[in-house]
Amino acid sequence: MDKEEKRIKHLEFIEGVINRMASNSFQMKNWMVVCVAALITANSAQPSIPILLALLPVIVFCYYDVRYLQEEKMYRDLYEEVSKENNEVELFNMDASKFKSKHSLWSVFKSWSIWPLYVFVISAILIIHWWPTFIDWISKQFCCCCN
């Protein structure tokens, strides 16, 4: 196996890691939706279960999702570096940690695939939590028969 074939095989290994990270990130979103839906359903059936408990899986899965996307971005950078003709990367080196400083957790959170979903879900949970209070307040403010 010559050096070019080894480099191509190395790129295939990196592609495999990138695909697994993308798949794991997608799974985090799926599990978050399932857990939040289950907790909201449990709250509607048993109101003693606090609806704000649904924020816990959102925060946990958001963290894991951000970490998977961060790893994916680091491996994309490694792929880009290995794909260059005259690179200094040791063959079959899978260490992408040198790209970590380029992709902070906060910068990854601001990605279009992360923040809109999690901000929407958190907002929905908070609206569900405070909706009865808001309706009660509105009815007391504007209903002439309730005063």
Image (tube, rainbow, N blue to C red):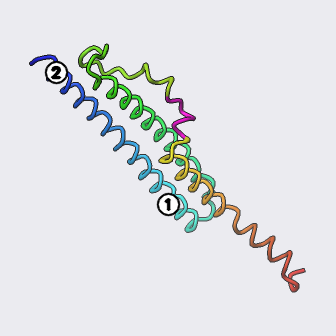
Residue at mark 1:
37
Residue at mark 2:
4
| Quadrant of the rendering where the N terminus is positioned | top left
Could you tell me residue 146's position as x and y percent? 86, 82
Tag 2–tag 1 contact (CB < 8 Å): no
Q: Left or right: where does residue 91 sit relative to residue 47? A: left
Classify 10 Å Cα crowding around label 1: few (below 14), some (14-19), many (20 and above). Answer: few
Residue 85: within the magenta?
Answer: no
Q: If you read the primary sequence from the N terminus, does the residue marked by circle 2 or circle 1 appear first? A: 2
Q: Is residue 73 above or below residue 132?
A: above
Residue 40's quadrant in the figure? bottom right
Could you tell me residue 70's position as x and y percent? 45, 33
Amino acid type, mark 1? Ala
Cα–Cα span, label 2 and label 1: 50 Å
Q: Which residue lies most toward the bottom here? A: 145
Q: Residue at x 46, y 41 (%)?
A: 65
Amino acid type, mark 2? Glu
Q: Left or right: where does residue 6 sit relative to residue 88? A: left
Q: Which residue lies most toward the front here? A: 85
Q: Residue at x 41, y 33 (%)?
A: 73
What is the magenta range?
Answer: 103-109
Q: Nearer the viewer, residue 93 or 118?
A: 93
